[in-house]
Image (cartoon, coloured by chain):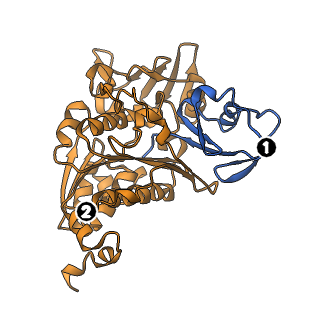
Amino acid sequence: MDLYDRYSRQELFSPIGKEGQKQIQQSHALIIGAGALGTALAESLTRAGIGKLTIVDRDYVEWSNLQRQQLYSESDARDRIPKAVAAKKRLQDINTDVEVVPHVMDVSIEEMEQLIVGVDLILDATDNFDTRLLINDISQKANIPWIYGACVGSYGLSYTIIPGKTPCLQCLLDSIPLGGMTCDTAGIISPAVHIVVAHQVTEALKLLTRNQAALRGSLYSFDLWLNSSSSISVEKMKKHDCPSCGKTPSYPYLDKTNSTKTAVLCGRNTVQIRPASNTSINLETLAKRLTPFGQVSKNHYLLSLTKGEHRLVFFTDGRVLIHGTKDISEAKKLYYQFVG
Amino acid sequence: MKIYVNGKEKLLGTETKTIMTLIESYGLNPKVVIVERNKDIVAKENYVSTILEKGDYIELVHFVGGG
């Protein structure tokens, strides 16, 4: 077996060819999140022979991840190995040519500004919109394309954002969707992950091999269980006054005053999470979603969910108090499990 | 009345008259939904006033956060 045969089948695919393969091997992709989407994206790009892969995740491997997070094994869950570290180990087993750089960190503005240096493409594999809107702004500011991907249940969607060309995520969203379904409330089946990843990786290969004309150019969604799919051309949604990609951008999510803030409330064993200003949370729908996961009580102003040692209190302005911890990353993890 | 949603036939009850009631019938938050009707994007402020008609082709995408 000749080592140089490694990418032969990909090179035989004429839109890529030997030249495209060279470009892939000279590229640097940044994957934010090493959960279901992140592990599948990383494995595909590693096998495709990408030059450098930076993987960022704040979490460690748990048993409930193994059903779909394809780079992890039982020993990773048993030893609670940080996902970025476990991912690198498996990826280097697959392909030693690829430079894999793992970061065990929670990405906020400062980290993002450092992570994007020298990056050709950002792949979204996060579990929340706060980070996505941060990716969206940095992508515009640094002129780096990014590919949105998300899934829950048997549903998923993907969209490719090219600065200066396509509408950005901010153009498509009126407000940050909080209190929606998450994998921790509505579940997830692995095929939904793989459809999203198939779209993200294909778009990535087109971008990295300078096949821009082949890009999908639409917002794609599907529901595998309902056997339905949809593709919407959204180019008309580009807003010229968009604060992220418009004529005079202010990049609101790169401004600390607009980002989600966390604070440990002294002496109360409580962390407060206060999301960005333009958030809306519907306590009625949230109550319905959270009922199976603990004891839920609600009044006109707030909703309280008690789960094990923790109690999460949601206010209508989007603020959440997480009682039972002083650890910000533990609090954030609980928050995104239920808020998305 | 028969319309098509994401490529599939859908029979509407009499209570589903507008884009907004269609979105609600799926239990979705209209703020995070993008709707295309017969190849044209429907602006969010027109969800309530846009009346569905027989044979409409609706594409409906909602944003989720999981990953």
Q: Where A186 sits versus A291, above or below?
A: below
Chain under callout 1? B
Left or right side of B28 for A92: left
Residue A264 vs residue A121, the one in the foreground: A121
Residue A222: x and y in percent read 56, 52
Q: Mark 1, residues whose alpha carbon is within 10 Å: few (<14), some, or many (≥20)? A: few
Local secondary structure at mark 1: loop
Q: State the residue position of label 1.
A: B54
Query: Image quadrant for the C terminus of chain A?
Result: top left
Colour chosen for chain B: blue
Q: Which mark is residue A91?
A: 2
Asked whether residue A171 appears in the rendered view, the answer is yes
Left or right side of A319 for A131: left
Residue A317: x and y in percent read 46, 17
The residue at the point 57 percent across, 34 percent down is A289
Residue A174: x and y in percent read 48, 28
Q: Where A136 sits versus A202, above or below?
A: above
